[in-house]
Structure formats: C-alpha cells, structure tokens
Image: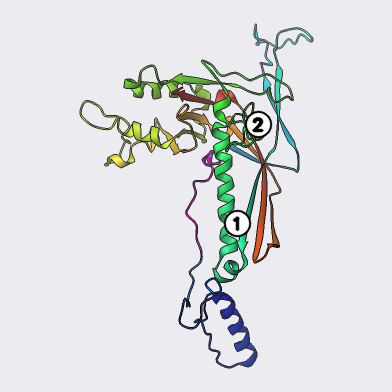
Amino acid sequence: MSAIQKFTDGIKESLQTGGKVKIDLREASALTGSGLDIGGRTHFDDVFAKLRYANPFRMGALNLKTPNVSAVQFVAKTGNATNQTNPWGYTFTPNTGTPGTATNFWQLPTRVITAQLPVRLAALDDINGLQNELIEDLILEFGQVEAASMAVNDDQTGSTTTTTGGTNGLRGLDSYTTAAASAFGTSGAGMTNGIHSIATIDMTASPSNLYNRIVEIANALPAQYWALDSVAWHMNPSMIMTLRELRDNSGLPLFLEMGEADESAAVGSIFGWKVIPNPYLSEDFPVYLACWNRFLQICDVEEMSIQMMEETAPGFMTMYAEKRVVSTVRDPFAGVRGSNA
C-alpha cells in the first residue's frame, strides 16, 4: 500500500472514530519485497521525468482542432479581384476585365502516433504519482515525435518504419521545394499536390560572411508580414551558437542585443524578431524566418485516446495511446529559410 493511501485511510478512520490514529510508514516496499529492516522505506517523493523539448512549432503556428476525420483540405484564394489595367472609376464591365482570381487547394491525410507502455502493478502501488507522470511525459514525447516529423520528414518517399514517419509521417519543412521565390504547389487531392516552393537563401556561398546571409533572409520576407505578432526566427542550437561567436573588428558580438550589458543575451532576437531555439531543424535548413500563424498550420484531431488495459501480462498493465495530427505550410509567402544543402 502506498504512503498516500495509508494517509487517506488514516484520515477516514480518525473521522469515523474521533480518536487518534497512528500511521505506520515503515512497511517494506512492494517493489523490493523485503522483510523487517531490509529495504523498507518511509517516503517516496512524487515521481518525475526528465523534461522533454516538446514542439516549438506550436509556439507560433496556427493550431486548429478538427473533428474525427481522415483528411484535411486546405484552400487559398489567389489572384486579384480589381481590374489590373485600370481599377479606378465607377464603371463595372460584367464578364470582361482581367481579375485573375483563382483558388489553390491541396489535401493531406491525418497521421497517427501510437504508444504502448507496460507498467508493473507493484510500481503503480509503490511510486507516488506514477500514472499521472506517465501520461504527462507521454504527451511531451508525442510532441517530440511530431516536431521531428514536421521539420525533416519526407512524406513522398522512405520506409514506413523510419523514425520521422516516412510515407506514414507528416510533410516536413525540409521536403518543400527550394526556390528563389515562394510559390504555391500544384492543386489537387493527391499526395503529390500542395508541395509549395519556399524562398531560400544559400548560406554556403559565403560562409565567412554569415551576417550578410542573415540580412538577406530577413530581406526576403515580404514586408507585409514584418509587423505581425507571430513573426519569429526558428534556428537550431548549433546555428545560434555560430551566430553568437560572430565578432566585429573590436571583438564585440555582431548580434549583441541593444540595451543588454552582457553577451549572454546575444541572439535572443535579431532585427527585432524573437529567436526560438528549435533543435528539430536539420543542418541542411537550420534557419527559418516566418510569420508562423500564416506560414505553418497544425490540425489536431480533437480526440486523443489513452487506455489502460489490466493484466495484459502477469503482474503488468499496459497503457495504449494514440494521437492524430496533420500539418502543412499554409502560406508559402509568409516564410523564408536559409540553406546549407
């Protein structure tokens, strides 16, 4: 019996009898099965797990809940409704003119992450807070798995058993087309549709002048996004460290924060936009600058299943869990990136 259960039973007994109740916490651990004065315990602190870096893409991306569906379709309005020859004046000319309006659409299936965790029954009884911690850590683990897939997975090729999902995973940012200018991918409901082009700055051309490459990435983001709240840099930690080591001729950090006295604050923001460390970004594309709530959309199926099955093996119970999610670059014009590829 756990210490918490003993406290609960003691309180109930005291309320019923009105008398003083002694609670013996010296009983041997159910895990060790020890006898008198051997392996006994008086207290187990609440269990905890090492903190995981969950999914940094969710900090700015458009996060939506979807009903219990197997696919999500995305639609973008493109083109101009005004007459591009001369939009001024009161005269309308029905069925004439060149408005050039159209839609671009693509469809992606929801993907499922599953987990299976056997738990020793004696551990559940003996370790305080174990079940809640298992669930909390599992949710963070799901966040890790989906973030890795959102960053680097290629949903067009690869084995279905790869760690980021392969053809069963999400469409990772790395799999979008590298281009000088952003553009929507082809329209349709097939798996080859919706692979957009993302404006990409080559960072290998002049590695000795990395500062200028960062400036070029900032300049490549269209000005209409600059003042929006969700604009931020995502960089992998090795790139952040490289930028921190850049010095001017006087030995001062090139990215020293204005108004900060010490160098440890360097690269907390660049050109007024916050820098978010993202360890899931690859070395091929270590830098993204985007208006994230327009650039990336994440849709979670609103039901996440967690079930405990008792006695799946003698002395054990097993926790099963699944979560379904889909993600996509929603507006390819709202983000740019740097490439080492």
- The residue pinned by badge 1 equals 135
Does 175 appear above or below 305? above
Front residue (pair 287, 37)? 37
Q: Say which residue appears at 39% left-offset and 30% top-offset.
A: 271
Range drawn in magenta: 47-59
x and y percentages locating residue 181 in the rendered image: 53, 16
Which of disc 2 and disc 1 is earlier in sequence? 1
User: Is residue 48 part of the magenta span, yes or no?
Assistant: yes
Which residue of the protein is positioned furthest toward the right in this rendering?
95
Q: Secondary structure at mark 1?
A: helix
- The residue pinned by badge 2 equals 167
Quarter in which the N terminus is drawn: bottom right
x and y percentages locating residue 69 in the rendered image: 76, 40
Q: Say which residue appears at 66% left-offset and 57% top-offset.
A: 319
> In the rendered structure, which amino acid carries the disc numbered 2?
Thr
Q: CA distance from mark 1 to mark 2?
A: 27 Å
Q: Residues within 10 Å of mark 1 (few under 14, many from 20)?
A: some
Q: Residues within 10 Å of mark 2 (few under 14, many from 20)?
A: some
- Horizontal side of 201 relative to 313 (left or right) equals left
Q: Say which residue appears at 54% left-offset and 76% top-offset.
A: 3
Q: In the figure, residue 13 lies in which quadrant?
A: bottom right
Front residue (pair 51, 186)? 51
Q: How many marks?
A: 2
Front residue (pair 136, 17)? 136
Front residue (pair 122, 291)? 122
